[in-house]
Amino acid sequence: DTGVSQNPRHKITKRGQNVTFRCDPISEHNRLYWYRQTLGQGPEFLTYFQNEAQLEKSRLLSDRFSAERPKGSFSTLEIQRTEQGDSAMYLCASSLRTDTQYFGPGTRLTVL
Amino acid sequence: KQEVTQIPAALSVPEGENLVLNCSFTDSAIYNLQWFRQDPGKGLTSLLLIQSSQREQTSGRLNASLDKSSGRSTLYIAASQPGDSATYLCAAGGLTGGGNKLTFGTGTQLKVEL
């Protein structure tokens, strides 16, 4: 069990650029979640996958955001045409069934 | 819409003191309640999960209780240590499409002083 991993750990980009983050869940976990956390706040739910199916998306996930989980393994979160308001920590979590969610270290995005 | 509140926002205690962190939620129809620890700039570490049918869970010096009817959970930390210094987050879980969507509070920032 190597835990949940996320790459990159830090990303600095200019406004208007596209960015993509990757999450590798714990190997046997079939559920994968993305959350976003801004400074001084708790994480906010963005989207959820069960295997390869994306079953729920938050209203926070605008049209500029897209997430995939091909073959039910790793997941990617892409943000197109980044805005300064997208600056945040993006957290990925995985779980087996609806049990404890295990979080990765996060990707910190800074949009200049 | 579920809302989660944590009180106090910050807490400073001397080493060795027992302490209680509070969490309240507005919708009692939760699936479970999870407590996490977050160190600065890091991800979340799961501490305890209480299913909706349970009243409490214990792990080492930590004890978490759940009262669904009143919409409250508490995290009790015994004999606090400087290494316990971190932000503690509670999250109410709600079932969604076979998953468990967590709604977080804003956390309690704990500092344990020597």
Image (tube, coloured by chain):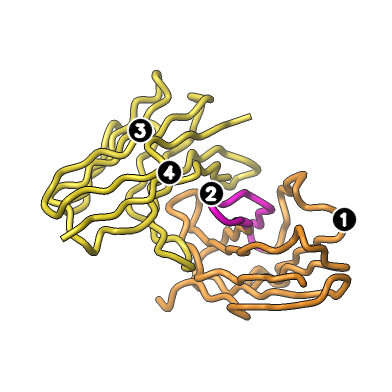
Mark before the other along the chain sequence, 4 or 3: 3
Q: Closer to the observer: label 1 or label 2? A: 2
Disc 3: which residue: B73
Q: CA distance from mark 4 to mark 3?
A: 8 Å
Q: Residue shown at 77%/44% (left/top)? A: A59
Chain letter for the yellow colouring in the rendering = B
Question: Mark 3 and mark 1, same subunit?
Answer: no
- Residue at 50% x, 44% y is B106
Query: The numbered mark 3 sits on a residue in which chain?
Result: B
Give the CA separation, mark 4 to mark 2.
Answer: 9 Å
Q: Is residue A3 shown above or below A39?
A: below
Helix, strand or loop at label 4? It is: strand
What element does badge 1 sit on? loop
In front: mark 4 or mark 2? 2
- Element at badge 2? loop
- Location of the N terminus of chain A by quadrant is bottom left
Q: Residue at x 42, y 40 (%)?
A: B33
Letter of the chain in orange: A
Residue indicated by mark 2: A42
